[in-house]
Image (spheres, grey):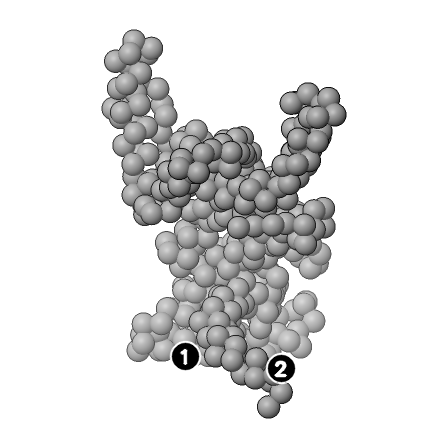
Amino acid sequence: MTPRRGAVLLVAPLLLSLLIGFVAPIGAFLWRAVADVEVPSVLPRTLAVLRSWDGAAIPDAAFAALAEDLREARARDTETGAGGIARAAARLNAEHPGMRSLLPATGRRVAQTGDDRSRILSVSEEWATPAPWRAIERAGGPVTDFRLLAALDLGRDGAGAIVAVPRDAAIWRGILGRTLGISASATILCLILGYPLAWLIAVAPARAQPWLLGGVLLPFWTSLIVRTAAWMVLLQKEGIVNAALIGAGMLDRPLPLLLNRFAVLVAMVHILLPFMVLPILAVVREMDWRLARAAASLGAAPSRVFFRVLLPLSLPGVGAGCLLVFVQALGFYVTPALLGGPNDQMLSWFIGFYANRTVDWGMAAALSVLLLAAVAAVIGLYGRLVGFDKVKTA
């Protein structure tokens, strides 16, 4: 056995476990962003007829196929409680408003066999127009870009061209911008606080360094929920911060410190600060201090030594810390949900909303793809501008 084959066999169980326990579940979830299975599973005969439809006069075979599909789906829903018609109607409603109620009503009307065309038209004359049939055709799967376009505030018009949604319905690009803005703000604050803290730890006496480093690592040893709840207690109107300020005579009434952007940023910085301090500290400790002494001996002022010598040497740690903080901040969910207001929720909150409350896994997956693309873009941009080979982390 060659050394290379032996190495592959040694890591094979780890790679297999990562594939089964990590990559496959994430891939299956993200696949829901483009999978279109709700309508094909309920209306297979109708879709088969519409594949040869010219888009003009609706053939009688389409009415018969729709009635047969709905009768079968109703029987299946009654027997298993699957709710297939409701899910198909919700999917079609995104293509053509009104289908959420029109499709179930049609299913009830054609429950008994008879003249299917007249029964369907008696529910609504809209079935005599191409619009609902085109919606069924567009939702016929097996894949669709509908949700991905919706996550970018885009859609398709009647001709199939990609167009922007109306301004009053465009929300996701604004939420993505808010997510990027909050993450960037948290990163900048962490850098402002973390850089001097890392420098202080690096130049502190050997006896003091473990204590200072332990203070930085303290958030790692506390649950995220506990830390967030602690900030809720501190920042509420009757909390410790307002009570201390009023007791010191600095305020006449409590400040609104909770359920706003201020509270979100304070808690995020508290949680993410160690991820900024540790990479910078690792780089500062490895710097060649002889360069600084040489610059000083040649007459450079302390400020000039710092900005021309020490700061450039520490930039790899700054870059690594900013990347770690920014990427993690993009995925924050609990902290903005508990400490922020309606205008402070980030993209992760809406992913959770669609996954847990509306049970729209497809839209949750589409928003996850959008967030994943943002993370990949940030990492790619960082690698292009800085280069990962220049980054030294602890």
Determine the residue located farthest toward the right in the rendered image. Answer: 298
- Where residue 142 appears, x then y in whole percent? 58, 73
Q: Is residue 355 left or right of residue 378?
A: left
- 316 and 257: which is toward the camera: 316
Q: Is residue 247 visible?
A: yes
Amino acid type at mark 1: Glu
- Distance from disc 1 to disc 2, alpha carbons, whole Å, reads 57 Å
> Residue at the location (45% across, 34% down)?
205
- Where residue 300 appears, x then y in whole percent? 71, 23
- Where residue 58 appears, x then y in whole percent? 61, 70
Q: Which residue lies under the disc numbered 2? A: 4
Question: Cβ–Cβ below 8 Å for labels 1 and 2?
Answer: no
- 193 and 28: which is toward the camera: 193
Residue 168 in which image quadrant: top right
Q: Is residue 171 left or right of residue 358?
A: right
Determine the residue located farthest toward the bottom in the rendered image. Answer: 1
> Residue at the location (35% across, 19% down)?
255
Q: Callout 1: 10 Å neighbours few (<14), some, many (20+)?
A: some
Helix, strand or loop under label 2: helix
Task: Say if 258 sits above or below 35 in the image.
Answer: above
Determine the residue located farthest toward the front in the rendered image. Answer: 297
Q: Is residue 279 left or right of residue 268?
A: right
Dot 1 or dot 2: first in sequence order is 2
State how many labels appear: 2
Look at discs 1 and 2 and give the one toward the viewer. 2
Task: Say if 17 sits above or below 320 in the image.
Answer: below
> Residue at the location (51% across, 37% down)?
202
Q: Which residue lies under the disc numbered 1? A: 72
> Residue at the location (28% across, 11% down)?
248
Q: Is residue 14 left or right of residue 305?
A: left
- Where residue 64 appears, x then y in whole percent? 51, 78
